[in-house]
Image (cartoon, rainbow, N blue to C red):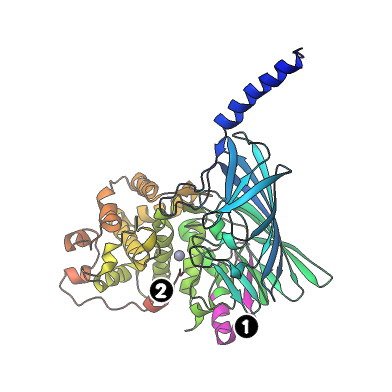
C-alpha cells in the first residue's frame, strides 16, 4: 500500500475530479430491452443472470403470492442502473447487500439503481422482496397467470415470468433455478426439474424444486393446486414426475393415458434427437380452461381441453420434442420461432409415421394440397413470421412442410444426421434459423439457400415445379386424386391452439 501525504483540501479536490468521470462518464443505464426486434421491451441489457433462487409463499384461497428472489448475475457493461421485467409489488431491492432504489416504468419494467455503480464484468447479487396478487396484474392488456378453483398457474409464451418472479425475460439469458414454494397442507406446488425435498410445518408444506441446467425464463413454470402426483422412471433411468389436478372430471382418464406415456415418448424421441438432455421429466395438467399446451422445461404444461376428445399422445410428442428443439437449443430472437415449432410439429409427423397413421410425406402432401395459392396461410413466412404471426398455424404446418422438403432434398441419411446433430451443436444455448441452414449445408454438403428461401421466406405458395423438385405433392403432380386426410391429422391439429392472449 502506498501512502501519500496530501493536504486535506487537495485530497478532496482530487477525489471529486476522479469520481465524476468514473461514474458519470463510463457508467450508464442498462437498456430496457435485450434487443429483440419483435419485442423491444423484453429482457434487459447490461447483465447476464446465471441463477434464480425463488423462495415463495402462495395462498390459493386469495391468490396472494409473497416472494424473495435472489438473482446471481454478471454485468456486461459499466452500469449506473439496470432493469428487471416484473409486475408484482416490490417491497425492497438489495444489490450486493446494499439497499437499492427502484421504480417502475413501461408495461413491465422494474428499474433498479444500486447504491454504487457496478463495474463491467463483476458478479452481482440482486435480492428482490415482493408480494402481490398475480391475477390482478396485466401487461399490454393480458395476463399469463391462470387462476384455477384451487390455485394458480404461470405458463405462457413468450411471457410468463412477469407474474411470479422478476427476471431478465428473454431466451437469450438462460439460468439455473431453485424454486421453493410454501403452500397450505393438502395443496401441491409444481415446478420444473427435480423435487429435491418437501417438508411440512404448522399447516404449510414446502416444495423444493431444482433445474440444474440452463433454462429460459418462459420455460420456468409454477402451478399450485390440488394434484395427484405419479412418479416413475424411463427405460433409460430418467425420473418422471407427473401431476394431474384432482378436478379434471371426464378428461382425467384421457389425460393420464396420454401423459403417462411421457417416458416412452421421450425414449422414442431420443432415437431421433440424441440423448434426453435433462435429469427430470414429466407433465402436469391443472384445471384451467385455457386451450394450449406449453413445453415448460422438463415438465410441460397441458390444458385439460387437449384431452377432451380422448387420449392424445401427439401433443405429448410435440411438447417433449421441444425439450430438444426449443429448450435445449433456444431461439436467439423470437423471429427464430421456426427452429422450435417447425420441428416439434415435424416430430408429430414422425410419430404418425411410427403409429402407421400416415407418413410425414403423406401429411406434407396433404398440407400442400389443402391450402390453395390464395390462402393467407402462404403469406406467413415461417422463417420470419413477425410478432403478430409468431404462433400462426403456418409456422407449424408450413414449417414442418419445409422440413419434409429438406428431407427429400438431402436424403434420409443426411436429414436424420442433422436432426440428431443440431441439439448437440447448440446444446444449452441459442441459435437462429440461419444457423440451422448453415448446419444443414455442412452436414449435407449441399447449398440450401434456394430451398430455405422458397419454403421459409417467400410470402407465397411454392409453385408446382419447386414442390416437384422437393418431391412434395407427388399425387397432384402425377394428376392423381388429391391426398386424403391422414388418420393422425385430427390429433395433430388438436395441438394447434398452442398460444392465446
Ligand atoms: Zn410448440
What residue sits right under mark 1 in the picture? 247
Residue 23 locus on image (x, y percent): 60, 31
In the displayed structure, does residue 328 sit left or right of residue 36?
right
In the displayed orientation, state which residue is furthest to the right: 202
Looking at the image, which is closer to me, 446 or 9?
A: 9
Q: Is residue 297 visible?
A: no
Q: In terms of depth relative to the viewer, which is nearer, 450 or 424?
A: 450
**3D distance between C-alphas at marks 2 and 1:** 26 Å
Residue at 33% over, 77% down: 486
Name the quarter showing ligand 1.
Answer: bottom left
Residue 236 in the magenta stretch? The answer is: yes
Q: Is residue 21 above or below residue 158?
A: above
Q: Which residues are magenta?
A: 234-258
The residue at the point 28 percent across, 46 percent down is: 447
Residue sitting at the far front = 9
SS state under label 1: loop
Neighbour class for label 1 at 10 Å: few (<14), some, many (≥20)?
A: some
Amino acid at each position: 500500500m502506498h501512502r501519500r501525504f496530501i493536504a486535506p483540501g487537495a485530497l478532496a479536490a482530487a477525489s471529486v475530479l476522479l469520481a465524476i468521470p468514473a461514474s458519470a462518464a463510463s457508467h450508464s443505464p442498462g437498456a430496457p430491452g435485450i434487443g429483440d426486434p419483435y419485442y423491444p421491451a423484453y429482457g434487459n441489457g447490461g447483465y447476464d443472470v446465471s441463477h434464480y433462487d425463488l423462495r415463495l409463499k402462495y395462498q390459493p384461497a386469495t391468490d396472494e403470492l409473497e416472494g424473495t428472489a435472489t438473482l446471481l448475475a454478471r454485468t456486461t457493461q459499466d452500469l449506473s442502473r439496470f432493469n428487471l421485467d416484473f409486475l408484482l409489488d416490490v417491497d425492497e431491492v438489495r444489490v450486493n447487500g446494499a439497499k437499492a432504489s427502484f421504480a417502475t416504468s413501461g408495461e413491465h419494467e422494474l428499474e433498479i439503481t444500486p447504491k454504487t455503480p457496478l463495474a463491467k464484468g463483476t458478479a452481482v447479487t440482486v435480492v428482490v422482496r415482493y408480494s402481490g396478487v398475480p391475477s390482478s396484474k396485466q401487461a399490454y392488456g393480458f395476463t399469463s397467470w391462470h387462476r384455477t378453483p384451487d390455485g394458480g398457474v404461470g405458463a405462457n409464451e413468450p411471457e410468463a415470468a412477469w407474474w411470479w418472479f422478476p427476471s431478465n425475460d428473454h431466451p437469450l439469458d438462460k439460468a439455473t433455478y431453485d424454486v421453493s414454494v410454501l403452500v397450505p397442507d393438502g395443496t401441491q406446488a409444481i415446478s420444473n426439474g427435480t423435487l429435491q425435498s418437501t417438508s411440512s410445518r404448522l399447516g404449510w408444506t414446502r416444495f423444493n424444486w431444482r433445474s440444474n441446467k440452463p433454462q429460459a425464463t418462459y420455460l420456468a413454470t409454477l402451478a399450485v393446486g390440488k394434484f395427484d402426483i405419479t412418479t416413475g422412471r424411463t427405460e433409460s433411468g430418467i425420473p418422471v414426475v407427473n401431476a394431474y389436478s384432482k378436478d379434471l372430471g371426464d378428461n382425467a382418464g384421457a389425460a393420464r393415458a396420454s401423459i403417462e406415456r411421457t417416458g416412452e415418448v421421450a425414449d422414442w424421441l431420443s432415437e431421433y434427437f440424441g440423448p434426453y438432455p435433462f435429469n427430470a421429466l414429466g407433465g402436469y395438467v391443472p384445471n384451467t380452461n385455457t386451450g394450449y399446451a406449453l413445453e415448460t422445461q422438463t415438465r410441460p404444461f397441458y390444458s385439460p381441453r387437449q384431452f377432451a376428445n380422448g387420449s392424445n399422445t401427439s401433443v405429448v410428442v410435440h411438447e417433449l420434442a421441444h425439450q430438444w428443439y426449443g429448450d435445449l437449443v433456444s431461439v436467439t430472437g423470437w423471429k427464430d420461432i421456426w427452429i422450435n415449432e417447425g420441428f416439434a410439429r415435424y416430430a408429430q409427423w414422425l410419430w404418425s409415421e411410427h403409429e402407421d397413421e400416415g407418413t410425414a410425406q403423406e401429411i406434407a402432401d396433404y398440407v400442400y394440397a389443402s391450402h390453395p395459392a390464395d390462402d393467407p396461410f402462404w403469406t406467413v413466412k415461417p422463417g420470419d413470421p413477425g410478432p403478430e404471426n409468431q404462433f400462426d398455424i403456418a409456422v407449424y404446418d408450413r414449417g414442418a412442410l419445409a422440413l419434409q422438403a429438406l428431407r427429400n432434398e438431402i436424403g434420409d441419411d443426411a436429414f436424420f444426421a442433422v436432426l440428431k446433430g443440431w441439439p448437440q451443436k447448440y446444446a444449452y444455448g441459442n441459435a437462429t434459423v440461419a444457423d440451422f441452414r448453415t448446419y444443414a449445408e455442412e452436414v449435407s454438403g449441399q447449398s440450401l439457400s434456394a430451398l430455405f428461401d422458397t419454403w421459409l421466406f417467400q410470402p407465397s405458395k411454392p409453385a408446382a415445379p419447386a414442390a416437384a423438385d422437393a418431391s412434395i405433392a407427388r399425387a397432384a403432380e402425377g394428376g392423381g386424386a388429391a391426398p386424403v386426410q391422414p388418420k393422425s391429422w385430427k390429433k395433430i391439429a388438436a395441438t394447434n391452439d398452442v398460444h392465446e392472449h
